[in-house]
Amino acid sequence: MTLTSTSAKTGRHFRLGILGAAMSLVSATVMTGVAGPGAAASSAASKYNILLIPGLTTDPFYITMGIGAKQEAAKLGVNLQWAGATTWSKSLQIPIVSAKLATHPNALLIAPTDDVALFKPIDAYVTAHIPVIAVDTTLKNTSILTAAISSDNYQGGQTAADTIAKLAHDKGSVAVINVVKGVSTTDLRQAGFLAEMKKYPKMKVVATEYDNDSATTAEAQARALILAHSDLVGIFGTNLYSAQGAARGVDAVGDKGKVFVAGYDAEPAEVQLLKQGVINILVIQNPAMEGQLAVQYAYDVLTGHSSMVKKSVLLPNVVATTATANQPNVAKYFYKTSL
Ligand code: T6T
């Protein structure tokens, strides 16, 4: 991979800039996208092999993360390896994590599909003196991690709740369609949503469903929820597949504009549903920047600059609504579908 000769100082200032801005939900204009120099590449950098294991390899969120990571690896002249399961499954991810240890990467970047079950396989890397950075999701026990990089998931859930409440004039029943219990990101989104809903005395959360990361299941759940609750005014789909499925369910029964949909992420089908007004709001993350920062951090640790690494990073979200979906400063955050 190509080496670059940007100054380490510039790279560090860039990162501190991101982190300073990252503590709250901000508008799209505040975010800078995948940009900025990384730390200086040393001539020995290409000896480093960094392994990135996403939650699943086929999800545009992780594909976009992979693009950011790949670009940063190219800048720094390190090798990036990408490996994972094609569906969200701890029982598929664990054997991949364990098998890849034998390849002795210099650092592991990983989105654990379960915040407890992945502890042991990840700890095996730490025992082998391989630094581990959690990216997107994390573990319950973060003590073994060099760093954890994610989005402000709790605040994203709060925003989803406030948006539905506003659209529904603060009254009616709402439901959550989540992925599976034990996922740090989506658990926090749900917690933020439920806590925020308590601020609306005339609103009631009538159900929390788990779709196991299947849009088809989420669609069936949305249809059933609408049938079961005649006063349903909103559904929060906590990730890409949950939101997509929830919206399709609402659309299929002709409830667009009656049952408001707040979703997460921004792959093409969701964006289309947003533009059509079936989805009313998308909380969008910056996976490319997460991937970029994870590679920068791994490089810092490997080159003796651990003091540059922040133990916990929360990047800000971008909010897109039907009204703003065509704005270039929003559209630039939509996810990519190929690496
Ligand atoms: O929402 C993202 C990610 O942040 C979450 O941890 C799992 O689901 C996604 O990958 C979207 O499908």
Image (cartoon, rainbow, N blue to C red):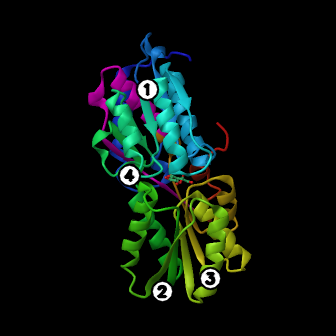
Q: In which quarter of the image is the N terminus?
A: top right
Q: In this view, does 269 lie above or below 261?
A: above
Residue sitting at x 38%, y 52%: 116
Kindly report which numbered mark, 2 or 4, lies closer to the viewer in this rendering: 4
- Pointer 3 or 1: first along the chain: 1
Quadrant assignment, res 83:
top right
- Assign the C terminus to one quadrant of the image: top right
Please give the residue where the numbered disc 1 appears in the rendered image: 38
Instruction: Kindly identify the amino acid type of the residue bearing the numbered disc 4.
Output: Val
The Cα atoms of the two marked residues, 3 and 2, are separated by 16 Å
Give how far across and how far down residue 187 sits, in percent: 42, 61
Discs 3/1, front: 3
Assess disc 2: are there few (<14), some (14-19) or many (≥20) residues with their C-alpha within 10 Å of its C-alpha.
some
Question: What percent of the width, then of the height, locates residue 306?
Answer: 29, 28
Q: Give the range drawn in magenta.
A: 291-320
**Residue type at mark 2?**
Lys
